[in-house]
């Protein structure tokens, strides 16, 4: 029983430390800077901002904004 | 002097070709694995919905299939829930994770054979667990009813998914971590911890009595909130901006939403035991955690809905957007409902009533499932290089999902409130309260039938996609620029030539 408890607590502690480390790592890496660029990383030249990329099959495209 | 007017367009075309080629390569690498996960998720959704229908009918017509011990309520209802959360949710979320992470990291899917094997073993695990429950081997612990001997078949494949997820992240070519990636990475950290700790505390008997109930509901709440919810939100943060071609409203808020969700959700589970024989402070912790959840819910809601502002007309033309917006709106609704439901004053009426069942379905079928459907509607044509065969079936699926979910939520939440108010009056006989709920239980069965119809429509469309039925290559849904299309065809010709096949 003691082993199981120690296992669970060690695991939880490890997970907590990992999350804190991850947050510190992300700050250090500049993940929370230049947010504008971050929000645009899902677009590229082939599928740029302003292009609608989905519509029902067999119907004309929804058009650009 | 250098003639920049000639070189710049060439560079742009070259960059465009690289980006499109990279996207095609990523999709090609994940085609088989992701298709297997999503095809199995639809199979299990059909099984879960069917099991739910049988359970629902039994509540207003107890004699229905009463002579078959395998299908008694105590067996078929856990099958409904476990198959829905692990069979449908587990495979749909894993497919979503693998495809989305590969796309956002801009890398090929690693270990495809291992992941394929993982998908097969995971499905065998779900099948074994389902048969075990039907045979009467349920553990009796809600949301963890699969017997312990089945768990390795579910846990080990998930290890492969975790490894693949982190491998893609380490290899990523993109410089930034998109908000969806935060959620996807977190799921693969949270979910194994949840399962291991909950199994240890319940089925392995590390604790018993009240402490076991706490562990059970800590898990029961978090399996929705720290497994299904993050995957759904990750899908919404990718699909809504991507489909309408507009960055999310506030990237700052999106990160605040992620970290506040990470900090607060874990504390909310004990509100399920309000009124139970627990120390009062444990319930209070759950209530406070639930109230704090307003922070991520509001920030995520603002982001999703404000991004859509000015683009609602696209709901007429985009199947992906219909499901994604339905899912994100229902996230706001069901999360507000869930947080308020945690309050003791609210629980005085709604606890131990049908209201809770209504809430769970608004979350799982109103929020999570539509976002998984949206992901499949968006990604499958790109993975299979083929358009959906029927727009009509997509529309049937959408309207069945929307109407069925609303009817279900209305029936159960209304019945729950009436039930709770009547139970507070000691002069009302319990049988009268049960009688009052019967018309609502019929309405629930009707709603379930509508949901089942929608699932079958999607299953047919999905099956046709896999069977290459009525192949259409030239629709703009797939690749919105002719250049992308030309590149893909050129790549196809090159591959066929390399294989010695005649070109097309």
Image (cartoon, grey):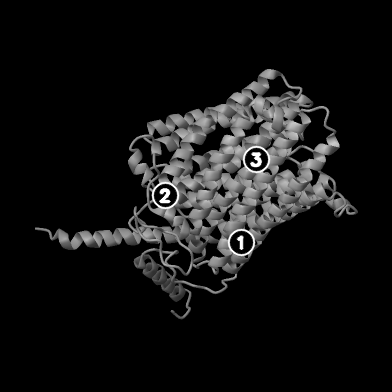
Residue B47 in percent (x, y) is at 72, 55
Residue B346 in percent (x, y) is at 66, 28
The residue drawn where x is 76% and y is 32% is: B422
- Secondary structure of the residue carrying tag 3 is helix
Toward which corner of the image does residue B12 lie, by quadrant? bottom left
The answer to which of B195 and B78 lies nearer the viewer is B78
Residue B406 in the image: above or below residue B398? above
Same chain for labels 1 and 2? Say yes or no: yes
The answer to which of B433 and B339 lies nearer the viewer is B433
Q: Quadrant of the C terminus of chain B?
A: bottom left
The residue drawn where x is 65% and y is 49% is: B407
**Where does label 1 land, which residue?**
B458
Q: Quadrant of the N terminus of chain B?
A: bottom left
**Where does label 3 land, which residue?**
B359
Report crowding for label 1: few under 14, some 14 to 19, many 20 or more residues within 10 A (C-alpha).
many
Q: Please, which chain is the residue tagged with disc 2 on? A: B
Residue B495 in percent (x, y) is at 45, 71
């Amino acid at each position: 029983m003691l082993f199981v408890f120690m296992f669970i607590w060690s695991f939880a502690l490890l997970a907590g430390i990992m999350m804190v480390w991850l947050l510190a790592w992300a700050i250090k890496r500049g993940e929370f800077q230049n947010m504008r660029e971050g929000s645009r990383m899902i677009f590229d030249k082939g599928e740029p901002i302003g292009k609608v990329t989905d519509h029902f099959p067999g119907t004309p495209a929804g058009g650009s904004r | 002097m250098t003639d920049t007017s000639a070189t710049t367009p060439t560079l742009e075309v070259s960059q465009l070709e690289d980006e499109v080629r990279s996207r095609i390569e990523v999709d090609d690498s994940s085609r088989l694995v992701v298709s297997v996960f999503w095809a199995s998720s639809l199979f299990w959704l059909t099984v879960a919905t069917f099991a739910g229908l049988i359970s629902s009918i039994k509540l207003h017509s107890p004699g229905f299939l009463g002579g078959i011990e395998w299908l008694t309520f105590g067996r078929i209802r856990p099958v409904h829930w476990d198959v829905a959360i692990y069979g449908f949710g587990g495979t749909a979320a894993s497919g979503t994770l693998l495809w989305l992470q590969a796309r956002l990291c801009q890398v090929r899917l690693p270990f495809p054979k291992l992941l394929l094997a993982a998908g097969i073993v995971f499905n065998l695990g779900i099948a074994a667990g389902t048969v075990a429950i039907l045979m009467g081997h349920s553990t009796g612990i809600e949301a963890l009813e699969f017997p312990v001997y089945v768990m390795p078949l579910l846990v080990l494949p998930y290890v492969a998914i975790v490894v693949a997820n982190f491998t893609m992240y380490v290899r990523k070519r993109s410089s930034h971590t998109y908000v969806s990636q935060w959620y996807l990475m977190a799921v693969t950290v949270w979910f194994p911890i949840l399962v291991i700790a909950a199994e240890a505390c319940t089925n392995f008997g590390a604790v018993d009595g009240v402490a076991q109930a706490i562990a059970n509901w800590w898990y029961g709440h978090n399996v929705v909130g720290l497994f299904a919810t993050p995957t759904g939100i990750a899908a919404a943060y990718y699909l809504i901006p991507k489909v309408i071609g507009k960055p999310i409203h506030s990237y700052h808020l999106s990160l605040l939403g992620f970290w506040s969700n990470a900090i607060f959700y874990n504390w909310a589970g004990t509100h399920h035991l309000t009124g139970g024989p627990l120390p009062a402070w444990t319930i209070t912790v759950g209530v406070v955690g639930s109230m704090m959840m307003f922070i991520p819910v509001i920030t995520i809601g603002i982001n999703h809905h404000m991004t859509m502002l000015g683009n609602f007309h696209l709901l007429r033309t985009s199947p992906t957007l219909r499901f994604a917006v339905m899912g994100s709106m229902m996230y706001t609704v069901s999360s507000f409902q869930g947080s308020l439901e945690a309050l003791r004053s609210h629980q005085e009426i709604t606890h131990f009533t049908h209201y809770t069942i209504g809430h769970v379905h608004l979350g799982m079928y109103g929020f999570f499932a539509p976002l998984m459907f949206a992901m499949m509607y968006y990604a499958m044509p790109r993975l299979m290089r083929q358009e959906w065969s029927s727009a009509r079936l997509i529309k049937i699926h959408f309207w069945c999902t929307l109407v069925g979910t609303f009817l279900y939520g209305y029936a159960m939440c209304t019945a729950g409130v009436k039930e709770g108010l009547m139970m507070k009056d000691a002069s009302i006989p319990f049988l009268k309260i049960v009688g009052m709920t019967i018309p609502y239980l019929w309405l629930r069965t009707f709603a379930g039938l509508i949901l089942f119809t929608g699932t079958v429509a999607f299953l047919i469309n999905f099956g046709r996609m896999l069977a290459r039925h009525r192949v259409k290559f030239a629709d703009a849904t797939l690749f919105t620029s002719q250049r992308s299309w030309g590149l893909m065809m050129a790549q196809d010709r090159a591959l066929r030539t390399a294989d010695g096949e005649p070109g097309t």
